[in-house]
């Protein structure tokens, strides 16, 4: 097993599998090469699992067909209606106001909320299940109460969507593949 070692003033050993699959060990200065080798050996299963996950994700990404510009446009139209409706419904439940709702095809974000309360959503959300759309809408609307991701913010989200963790997990597992459907 090949790995790079970066020594620094940190206190503990840590393993990182980088996006290209290479293994990096972050180590305190005084730990010997032998100890690092033993540490890596002890975590071989974990490293292999990570590398397999990465490879699978890369295969998935390569397998998805990007949307055409027309398909994207159609999604944006759908999103305008669908998300606007969800925003209205949840804003009432949360008792918050908001400004404009815009739909864009961003490459990295599912939604955002400006300090003025303008909401922005990614039209690719239309390819996600409805409970995920609910979560993204509620997440952004909760920023009308808490402009951060503090425990208070998450409590607001949970009060409306007790199962919001399932949607977060869905986005963690599938978000990247979905984003990669952006026209190339
Ligand atoms: Zn947020």
Image: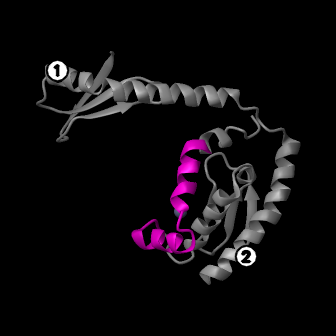
Task: Decide if ligand 1 comes within 8 Å of the CB at mark 2.
Answer: no
Q: Quadrant of residue 119?
A: bottom right
Q: Residue furthest bottom?
A: 95
Viewed as shown, does residue 143 lie left or right of 28? right
Residue 169 appears at what percent x and percent y? 53, 50
156 magenta-colored: yes
153 magenta-colored: yes
Q: Which residue is mark 2?
A: 88
In this view, 134 is above or below 42: below
Sooner in the amino-acid sequence: mark 1 or mark 2: 1
Q: Nearer the viewer, residue 128 or 146?
A: 128
In this view, 167 is above or below 46: below
The residue carrying pointer 2 sits among few (fewer than 14), some (14 to 19) or many (20 or more) residues within 10 Å by Cα, namely: some
- Quadrant position of the C terminus in the picture: top right
Considering the whole magenta stretch, tell me its main secondary structure. helix
**Residue 99 appears in the rendering:** no
| Helix, strand or loop at mark 2 | helix
The residues tagged by marks 1 and 2 sit, at their Cα atoms, a distance apart of 59 Å
Viewed as shown, does residue 114 lie left or right of 80? left
| Helix, strand or loop at mark 1 | helix
Q: Nearer the viewer, residue 15 or 119?
A: 15
Residue drawn at x 54%, y 62% as measured from the top left: 164
Residue 54 appears at what percent x and percent y? 50, 29
Residue drawn at x 15%, y 32% as measured from the top left: 29
On residue 33, the disc is 1
- Residue numbers of the magenta segment: 148-174
């Amino acid at each position: 097993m090949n790995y790079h070692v970066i020594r620094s003033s940190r206190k503990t050993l840590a393993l990182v599998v980088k996006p290209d699959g290479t293994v990096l060990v972050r180590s305190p200065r005084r730990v010997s090469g032998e100890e690092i080798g033993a540490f890596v050996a002890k975590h071989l299963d974990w490293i292999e699992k990570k590398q397999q996950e990465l490879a699978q994700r890369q295969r998935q990404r390569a397998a998805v067909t990007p949307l055409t510009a027309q398909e994207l446009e159609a999604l944006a139209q759908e999103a305008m209606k669908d998300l606007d409706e969800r925003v209205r419904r949840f804003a009432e439940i949360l008792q918050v106001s908001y400004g404009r709702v815009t739909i864009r095809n961003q490459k990295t974000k599912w939604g955002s909320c400006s300090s003025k309360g303008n909401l922005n959503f990614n039209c690719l959300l239309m390819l996600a299940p409805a409970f995920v759309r609910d979560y993204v809408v509620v997440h952004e609307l909760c920023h009308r109460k808490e402009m951060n991701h503090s425990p208070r913010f998450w409590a607001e989200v949970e009060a409306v969507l007790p199962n919001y963790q399932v949607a977060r997990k869905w986005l963690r597992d599938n978000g990247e593949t979905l984003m990669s459907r952006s026209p190339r």
